[in-house]
């Protein structure tokens, strides 16, 4: 396929700020804009200024005339628009259909694809005024580009023709990408506007002029150095200054002039404390003192010139109403655990982040079993046999910390970098899973369980856990961890937490977000197969018929969507095939649904023949 689009007839659906500018840029690159849709007077005026002479048409006529359809409508409108045009059979084979929504990749264009159209998603990472000045700002602007592999060069070429820099982005990363841009840009505006209002309350009329040099330098520093650009009282561990800020903003809040500023200050100061600790700007004790100041009401916190209070004493060892203490280094972890004393019972839950209700259920169980709870968040590279899987695994530390704060009862979060866990690179000495780790999941993911056991053994040691909680959904992982504890005489109790399911029965997994609606519907075949097997066992069916009941459900799955890896009755302790035909068994299943690998299992009680 030609990687560089020739002269194309371009139709713009939605002549807003983005559509008018991109249409103009494409026309400047030699393409012909054959029509545009504009529903408001402002859109028509903008189209006349940016695309003079281009006819304003109905949406359907624009699509019918175009070789390249540029959809620049609001995100919430896009899916229905594409579906409606596909139902009306307006898309034709070979037609380029391009949208500019940051939130979506090409899945939203599936109805057009089914009509033979070529789907492309391009999103310029910039704001638009809808005027000619945007054309110069397009030069060198990054565009997130998502498209099927064979046609990705076409999308990249279109971006280059408009003057931008294409950045290839996989479908599964679009939501994170868009959240990052919205968080950085939109919330920056909110934060700046709040600061201007507070300066106004201080009697400074032109708050923007006052802030411009400081914010410009701060933004430039952050873009160059990230957390390394942190300055100010939190980065110095100055709890007294922070407490004074809280008191002052609380009085402003009481006057009713800026009620939203105080909670924003608290939330961002907590996040800044965590980042300052992570980068070594402040010590663990300073971070805890700052968190305690931020947890109190302004008037009750340390006043100006007074020392910040020490860690709050609560019913739980180390617990703080502001949320768990975050540490990134082994040194800080040991410092915190050393302070607990010998009589504190410690629980740990090991995760790779992207926390969902299943993880939270394990943490609740841990909370009931111990005085102190540590949650670890570490994406372990040793567990991935494919680099692309590791690269696309979601990293959501800030969201995870917020979920843990809302849950309560978690005392410490250990979130180390890879270099902290494996200072010399890949460790030379590892735990080997043996024969149990080579079958089922181990056969599909060679080396996965060696990597899992290695990091679990290390984390058990680092967190000094008396008890750990693992989910039953990862049945083979649970069995291997218990076997490791037995074989190596580890002094830790391993407790199993029940599988948590969504309302439709799908087992919770961080990977579920990668399923399209159609794939999710087919994914329910896995839990449906397990339920069918349970019913057969409850009716006294022998092992072969129990397995057959599950196989029948999976046989009805769409073969182009569900690729079954294994379905097997196994011994729940050894994970070997169940041989006796009676007693406790585990029915395990794994399948790739679309591009997403899912696993599930259920306990089966096999009855002797009557």
Image (cartoon, helix red, strand yellow):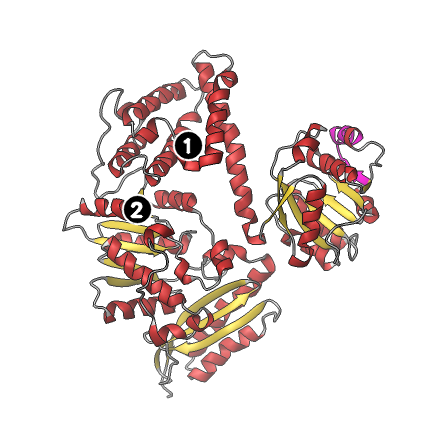
Please indicate whether residue 263 sits to the left or right of residue 47 in the image: left
Residue 541 in percent (x, y) is at 43, 82
- The picture quadrant where one finds residue 610 is bottom left
Instruction: Identify whether 200 is placed above or below 179.
Output: above
Residue 142: where, in percent of width, then height?
Answer: 61, 40
Quadrant in which residue 150 is drawn: bottom right
| Residue nearest the viewer, comparing 384 with 184 | 384
Image mark for residue 229: 1
Residue tagged by mark 2?
A: 329
Visible residue check, residue 15: no
Query: Could you classify mark 2 by the number of other residues whose Cα lies within 10 Å: few (under 14), some (14-19), or many (20 or more)?
Result: many
Neighbours of disc 1 within 10 Å: few (<14), some (14-19), many (20+) = some
The local secondary structure at tag 1 comes to helix
The residue lying at 60 percent from left, 60 percent from top is: 518
* Residue drawn at point x = 68 percent, y = 52 percent: 153
Left or right of 159, for residue 265: left
The verdict on residue 332 being magenta is: no
Instruction: State which quarter of the image contains the N terminus.
Output: bottom right
* Pointer 2 or 1: first along the chain: 1
Alpha carbon distance from label 2 to label 1 = 20 Å
Q: Is residue 42 magenta?
A: yes
Nearer the observer, 290 or 590: 290
Magenta span of residues: 35-48
**Residue 473: percent from left, percent from top:** 40, 64
């Amino acid at each position: 396929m030609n990687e560089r689009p020739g002269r194309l007839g371009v139709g713009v659906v939605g002549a807003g700020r983005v559509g008018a500018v991109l249409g103009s840029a494409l026309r400047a690159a030699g393409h012909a804009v054959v029509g545009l849709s504009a529903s408001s007077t402002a859109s028509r005026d903008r189209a006349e200024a940016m695309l003079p002479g281009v006819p304003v048409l109905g949406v359907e006529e624009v699509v019918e005339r175009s070789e390249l359809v540029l959809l620049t409508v609001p995100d919430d409108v896009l899916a229905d628009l594409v579906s409606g045009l596909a139902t009306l059979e307006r898309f034709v084979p070979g037609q380029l259909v391009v949208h500019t929504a940051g939130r979506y990749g090409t899945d939203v264009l599936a109805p057009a694809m089914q009509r033979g159209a070529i789907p492309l998603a391009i999103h310029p990472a910039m704001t638009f005024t809808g005027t000619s000045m945007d054309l110069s700002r397009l030069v060198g602007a990054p565009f997130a580009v998502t498209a099927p592999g064979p046609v990705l060069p076409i999308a990249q070429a279109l971006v280059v023709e408009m003057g931008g820099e294409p950045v290839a982005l996989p479908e599964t990363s679009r939501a994170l990408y868009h959240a990052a841009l919205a968080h950085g840009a939109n919330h920056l505006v909110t934060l700046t506007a709040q600061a201007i209002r507070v300066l106004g309350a201080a009697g400074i009329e032109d708050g923007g002029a006052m802030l411009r040099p400081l914010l410009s330098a701060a933004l430039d520093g952050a873009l160059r150095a990230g957390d390394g650009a942190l300055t100010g009282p939190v980065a110095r561990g100055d709890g007294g200054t922070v407490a004074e800020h809280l008191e002052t903003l609380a009085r402003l809040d009481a006057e009713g002039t800026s009620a939203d500023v105080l909670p924003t200050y608290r939330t961002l100061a907590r996040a800044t404390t965590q980042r300052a600790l992570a980068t070594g700007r402040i010590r663990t004790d300073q971070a805890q003192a700052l968190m305690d100041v931020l947890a109190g009401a302004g008037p009750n916190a340390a006043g100006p010139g007074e020392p910040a209070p020490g860690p709050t004493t609560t019913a739980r060892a180390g617990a703080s109403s502001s949320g768990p203490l975050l540490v990134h280094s082994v040194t800080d972890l040991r410092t915190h655990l050393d302070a607990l004393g010998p009589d504190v019972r410690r629980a740990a839950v090991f995760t790779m982040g992207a926390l969902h209700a299943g993880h939270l259920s394990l943490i609740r169980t841990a909370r009931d079993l111990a005085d102190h709870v540590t949650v670890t968040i570490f994406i372990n590279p040793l567990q991935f046999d494919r680099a692309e899987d590791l690269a696309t695994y979601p990293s959501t530390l800030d969201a995870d910390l917020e979920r843990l704060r809302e849950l309560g009862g978690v005392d410490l979060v250990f979130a180390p970098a890879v270099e902290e866990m494996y200072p010399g690179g890949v460790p030379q000495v590892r735990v080997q899973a043996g024969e149990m780790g080579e079958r089922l999941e181990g056969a599909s993911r060679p080396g996965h369980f060696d990597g899992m056991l290695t990091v679990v053994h290390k984390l058990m040691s680092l967190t000094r856990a008396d008890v750990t909680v693992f989910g039953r959904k990862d049945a083979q992982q649970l069995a291997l961890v218990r076997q490791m504890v037995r074989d190596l005489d580890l002094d830790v109790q391993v407790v199993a937490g029940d599988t948590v399911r969504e309302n439709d029965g799908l087992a919770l997994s961080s990977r579920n977000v990668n399923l399209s609606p159609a794939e999710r519907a087919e994914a329910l075949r896995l839990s449906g197969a397990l339920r069918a097997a349970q019913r057969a066992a409850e009716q006294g069916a022998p092992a072969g018929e129990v397995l057959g009941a599950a196989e029948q459900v999976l046989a009805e799955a769409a073969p182009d969507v569900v690729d079954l890896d294994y379905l097997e009755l196994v011994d729940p302790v050894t994970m070997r095939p169940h041989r006796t035909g009676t007693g406790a068994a585990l029915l395990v299943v794994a399948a790739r649904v679309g591009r997403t690998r899912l696993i599930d299992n259920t306990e089966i009680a096999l009855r002797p023949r009557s």
